Amino acid sequence: MSATLATGSDTLMSGVRVADLALPDQMEVTPTGGSLGAIVHGVDLADDLPGEVIGGLLAVLDHAGMMILRGQDRLTPQRQSEVTEWFGRPFFRDTGVDNMAMVGRTPVQILGSQAHDEGDVPAADVDSGGDLVPHSDVQDYQVTPNYTILHAIEVVPGSVGGNTYWANLYQAYDELDDETKALIEGLRWMPASTQATAYGVGMQSAKASVSRDGLSLESPVRHPVVRTHPVTRRKALWVSTAFTVRVEGVGDEADGKRLAKRLKTHANSERFSYHHAWSPHDVVMWDNRCVNHWREGWPADTRRTMHRSQAGSARPF
């Protein structure tokens, strides 16, 4: 995938320079060289970190869109849950059709294509191991998580799949022409229902719901096409392939679907993205308010295990 920021640039996704964040000396932060993201060195999340370091991590994530901390092999699920709470109250799914397996008694989800360890559930209940299309997490909910944290426990070789991509939705909005910006200002879009979304990725609880009640595609949720970030005040084109069904307020339903397709195609442009090949114990955090992500599938006979937690929740505006 292509990148738009020059390698070595010290400017983050929001337009703020790393130096302007006044980070503590132990934190070394380097932009990825892609259109978003930063790599953080000098921080072990398992340590008892001082407040200025924790505050620095929050500042970097709010301005970089996503950040990578490598070599976090001492990070336990319990500690990950504590780290997650730095970013806000843990976010839980609560509809019943999209409940996910948790790691023990922690608020950390297990995403694994071979999740058969004690306390886990069969792979079909957790992760299909297939491709996932661009999305911001849990956009089928009216109140969505602000942040996602993903800890790579087991990975597959990047040459065979499992790589993840993130996209800069500020840039996607900025590169729209003025006519389109004027058209979509104030418009809202409808996501697929939670039942349909969970069914689409093969969750057993959703399959049981569809078998019992039939498939419901309509959703009561409506989201702004243009979302404003509360920290940076930047505007993002907040649509996604996985969730956005149609835009409302632009003619009939067919017109709304055509506009949604056009905006999604634009948001998926390669020039907005950063590509990550996972190593064991990489921790990647991202901001769902201004970033989409997607991933490649991997062979069914390989193991890939991730621990995911989510924090903060807000009604998009």
Image (cartoon, helix red, strand yellow):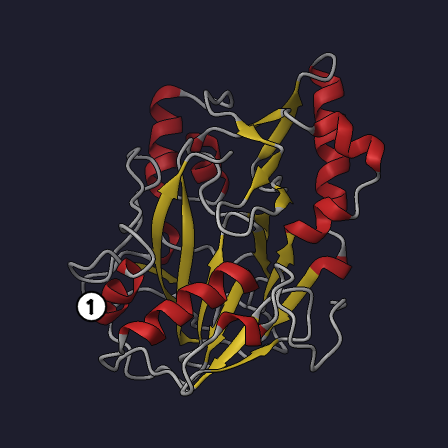
Q: Nearer the viewer, residue 25 or 206?
A: 25
Looking at the image, the residue that sits furthest to the left is 105
Q: Is residue 168 left or right of residue 135?
A: right
Is residue 11 positioned above or below 103 on the image? below
Q: Quadrant of the N terminus?
A: bottom right
Kindly state the secondary structure of the residue where label 1 is placed: helix
In the image, taking residue 96 as reference, residue 134 lies left or right, namely right
Residue under the point 75% across and 59% down: 270
Quadrant of the image occupied by residue 79: bottom left
Badge 1 density bin: few <14, some 14–19, many ≥20, Cα 10 Å: some
Vertical comparison of 313 with 50: above or below: above
**Residue 119 at what x, y percent from top left?**
19, 61
Q: Residue at x 33, y 23 (%)?
A: 212
Residue sitting nearer the eye, 180 or 202: 180
Residue 95 x, y percent position in the rendering = 31, 33
The image shows residue 310 at horizontal and vertical percentages of 35, 54
Q: Position of residue 254 (x, y in %)?
A: 74, 18
Quarter occupied by residue 277? bottom right
The answer to whether residue 151 is visible is: no
In the depicted view, which residue is nearer to us: 81 or 17?
A: 17
Q: For mark 1, what is the residue?
A: 78
Which residue does the image show at 58% across and 38% down from the upper left? 227
- Whether residue 96 is visible here, answered yes or no, is yes
Left or right placement of residue 90 versus residue 7 in this view: left
